[in-house]
Image (cartoon, rainbow, N blue to C red):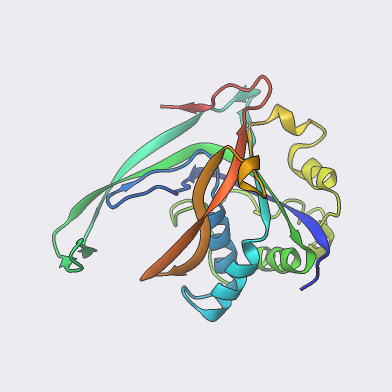
Amino acid sequence: MSSDKSFLALRFEGPLQSWGFDSQYNRRNTGLMPTKSALAGICCAAFGYPRGSDKEHEFLSSFGKVRMTAIDIPRSVSKKELPVRRLQDFHTVQNTRRASGSINKDCVLTYRQYLTDAAFGILLEGDTVLLGKIATALADPKWGIWLGRKTCIPSAPVLIGLKEKHGNVQGLLKKSRDEALRLIIGEKPLESFTHQEEVQTFTEGRDTLPDVPLSFATEKRLFSPRRVNTWQGRGARLRIEG
């Protein structure tokens, strides 16, 4: 695979989003930023890779080297900024697995969280060939893609600039980080937005997220840690309410 580096800009926008990274049993929380595992899952769905397949494993091995920056993009209606709220819903499910390994036939109540009215820009930095394949798959996904859960349907194309480029997917890859950022945030500086950046070494980061997928196989889901820094934008208020 080529060592040439490029940048790819994505957009996650929808009435509901859910980015789980610390969910346990019947409580499925959401983080405040998209996770790398969710992004990898979106890509695998776009490629049409089955869970636990050799193609999935090969892709995840390469995708782990891609650096991700997530940017919180405020949304407005009639010049009024929409608040982002954390919604908790209740579900009943059957045939859950007990700690002993047996199947529980009774209904179990689960608690699932969502972000409402959120929008994020995603900047990917990595191998040009790999990012080109991702862009091509997202432009015409083999399976449906969603923002964390199947109920969270994107309300805008995930690929930024695809319409303007008239379907020229390779034209979406940028050699400059600043050029790619302009597709997401325009001429405003990145420091104006709350954003989360993946770092390369442990000492560069402040927080650790267990969201780098090694396998999505149903019986053997494996993740490794990722070091990040999260920055509050200049003048930005905490946008999560409730």
| Residue 220, percent from left and from top | 39, 69
Q: Quadrant of residue 7?
A: bottom right
- In the image, farthest residue toward the left: 106
The extreme front residue here reads 203
Q: Quadrant of residue 194?
A: top right
Res. 239 in view: yes
In the figure, is residue 150 to the left or right of 61?
Answer: left
Residue drawn at (73%, 29%), measured in percent from left and top?
A: 191
Tell whether 70 sits left or right of 52.
right
* Residue 232 in the image: above or below residue 63: above
* Up/down of 171 relative to 55, above or below: above
Q: Out of 102 and 78, give the one closest to the viewer.
A: 102
Q: Residue furthest bottom?
A: 54
Q: Residue 45: image x %, image y %?
A: 55, 67
Report the residue at 58% width, 46% height from top.
227
Q: Quadrant of the N terminus?
A: bottom right
> Residue 224 location in percent, x, y?
50, 58
Residue 214 image point, x, y percent: 51, 66
Q: Toward which corner of the image does residue 192 lie, by quadrant?
A: top right
Left or right, residue 42 beside residue 69: left
User: Which part of the image, by quadrant, shows the C terminus?
Assistant: top left
The residue positioned 66% from the left and 61% from the top of the image is: 65
Q: Is residue 146 visible?
A: no
